[in-house]
Image (cartoon, coloured by chain):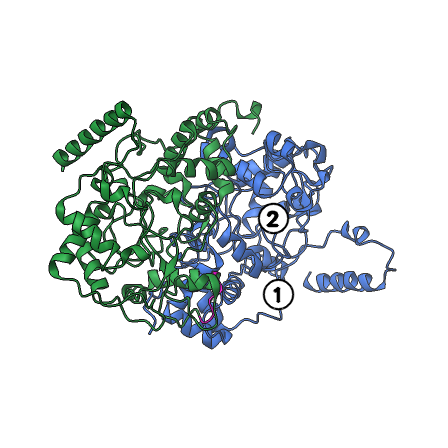
Amino acid sequence: MNFLTTISRAGFLASIFLVPAFLSSNALADQNLPLAALGAVPVPADNPQTSAKVALGKLLFFDPRLGGDASVSCADCHAPKQGWGFADPISRGYPGAIHWRNSQTVVNAAYLGKLFWVGAAKSLEAQAPSAAKGAVSGNGEADMMEARLAFIPEYAKQFRAIFGDRWPRISSAWKAIAAFERTLIHDQTPFDKFMRGDKTALSAEQQRGLKLFQGKANCIECHNGPLLTDQKYYNLGVPRAEAWLNSGLAQITFRYEQYAKGVTEDMYRTIKDDAGLYYRTKQKRDKGKFRTPPLRYTAYSAPFMHNGSFFDFGELIEFYNQGGGTNEFSANKTKLLKPLNLSDEEKENLAAFLESLSGEEIKMQTPKLPPYAPLD
Amino acid sequence: MHLRNFSCTGWSVVGLVAIVLIGIPLRGNPAAAESQFGPIKAAKVNAKKAELGKRLFFDPRLSGDAAISCASCHIPEKGFADGLALSKAYPGSDGFRNTPSLINAGQRAAWFHDGRLGTNLNDVTREMLTETYLMNMDMRLMQERLKQDPVYVQMFKDAGFGEPSNGSVRNAIPEYLKTLTSRGAPFDSGNLSDAAERGFETFKGKAGCAACHSGPRFTDDKPHNIGAPENPEIWRNPLRHVTFVTYAKFLGVENYMNIRRDIGAGIRTHKADGSDNGKFMTPSLRELKYTAPYMHNGMLRTISEVVAFYNNGGGNDANKDPRIKPLGLSKEERANLVAFLESLSGVPLTSAEHVWKDKINVNYQPIKDWLKKRN
């Protein structure tokens, strides 16, 4: 299998170089990359991994001083004990506010080409500051966060040694956090072992689920390749978040997001659901679309979907079995979803396969953080 | 205290009656009448806008994490200052300057101790709400919070603003601030003791205070360097020093990591010779009774200490204003000056006229039939 994967990947790469330029990449995009074990984590050339940098990044990931009122860190919405995400449908957000989307797991995020539910950040280095600064997430301000770092002697020392910073630069902090996140890798799942040749790694039930995944249930249409995602955007007809109907705080954030993302006034007045990719592209056809999420570590990262609509694999599979749902943007709903007519046993097999995409939980204690001290 | 206020108010009523009956201008105090000093005219305000501004002023939901309101640092009982040498700040930070009183702030020509905003209260309101170490509020989120509170929806409408918006907040809060006008000071009502009368003469004469402390608010609204001592607490406490660095960096101060001095109005001009460094806005002398400690960094605890400071010729600074020289005031002259300065404080602005007394319900209710309502 591994061998085959290599061959097909090589073939895929070759085809990119060999096909005439006038063939658009869309023609190739419909070819589903085969499932495969997870490979090595990609590391950008301008931010190489070092153990010192990773160690610093870990401290910063847990440090609430990288936020507005020094009370929330990355780890508050990406909590190790909550699948490195957040266990409510909608993330807790900044004090006095609530977020408006489900907090995604950080585990394996390093493999994704773009981050956030609609791919709003092109790298981990760009994701961290967006989260730290947003009014309903970290609400931090770069000058203030950078100044705080300078007054933590242990950080000043490490930033100097690792990045050569005279005083800690906030951009270096994001690099260190990204380096730490590149160590939160989950590649020893039963599925990965199976794909690497250990045919005992999956139970018979799970193997039947794998077959359904690639066959009758057609999950592979979007959840493909080593990451089990094509990293493209679809509207599945996921229903709107319940919170918007029954929580004043959530209604506030919902309107704030429309305002902050610059929709037309008419849209601000009338929209009642998260328009997803539209906020990036401002193309009507992108309303309600969200990036296909990767599937590893899902045993720990419920609830699922961009607004946490589903709490377990059973609910998730039933949603697809019925051909997805309907929402405000149903005109854009993907044609790929159709009722699947899965039997109860088939649903169980699929759920069993999904279980095989998670291995041992990645546990981590909150590290002891270095204190402030006056400057000389 | 109560008795004094009562008698003061009583006198004012008598004075007003006399004016109405006799038709002469309000001048109870011959000393005030002969000078540029005198009572501060109450500003014309739109009552409904001011009422809205009052509620906003006392509402903690106008800060990023909904933990502090304007009134957290501008406390009515403390003359709309906070009684601390150095102010608090947004949670997670501490301030590096003394909270100025907001009484009569509507009549200033420039705001903040360095005078860095010289436009209007609308801009001051924006700065206070959005600055990361002040209230750290994304005003877009603030707008949506206000729209969620039916009390505000009605109040904005009644004030003629339409639905709650950032622009109307920046109008309503200044309208409220304009209601914070000094009144009932013995100086204005002619209720000066002999000592205070003599102190006023010293103020205008031998002590030379009136060179800068001029006009009805006793300030020229300009920055000067008097060599006020640095407050070492700023550099000892990382939470304050961090705030200073954030401020200095944002305002383009070079070498912001290495300076250990509040450069004051130098931040506005960045003069190469540093001659504006260490200048701070002349503060009003009104309401000192409530607003100790004094100076931009709260280094002087009492009015007597302030008088002694000037009597000694101010502090040490290469760019100190040459007019600040040892005054050679006698003990009695100093006491008279203190008596005069004390006469510039009026009645506290702590009644419902100036303070939002109703409990503000900070919990948000969901909008019913949300799907059918326009956002």
Residue B254 spot, x, y in % from top left: 47, 70
Residue A250 spot, x, y in % from top left: 48, 36
Residue B233 quadrant = bottom left
Provide the residue designation for mark 2: A293
Give the mark nearer the N terminus: 1 vs 2.
Answer: 1
Q: Nearer the viewer, residue B347 or A313?
A: B347
Identify the secondary structure beneath mark 1.
loop
A40 w.r.t. B219: above or below? below
Residue A42 — which label?
1
Q: Residue at x 41, y 74 (%)?
A: A157
Q: Colour of chain A?
A: blue
Residue B107 quadrant = top left
A360 w.r.t. B290: above or below? below
Identify the secondary structure beneath mark 2.
loop
Q: Quadrant of the C terminus of chain B?
A: top right
Q: Which residues are magenta?
A: B251-255
Q: Nearer the viewer, residue A143 or B259?
A: B259
Which amino acid is tagged 2? Pro
Q: Are marks 1 and 2 on the same chain?
A: yes
Q: Nearer the viewer, residue B311 or A132?
A: B311
On screen, residue B9 versus residue A329, left or right, reads left
Which amino acid is tagged 1? Pro
**Are the two marked residues, 1 and 2, in contact with CB atoms closer than 8 angstroms?**
no
Q: Residue at x 56, y 61 (%)?
A: A125
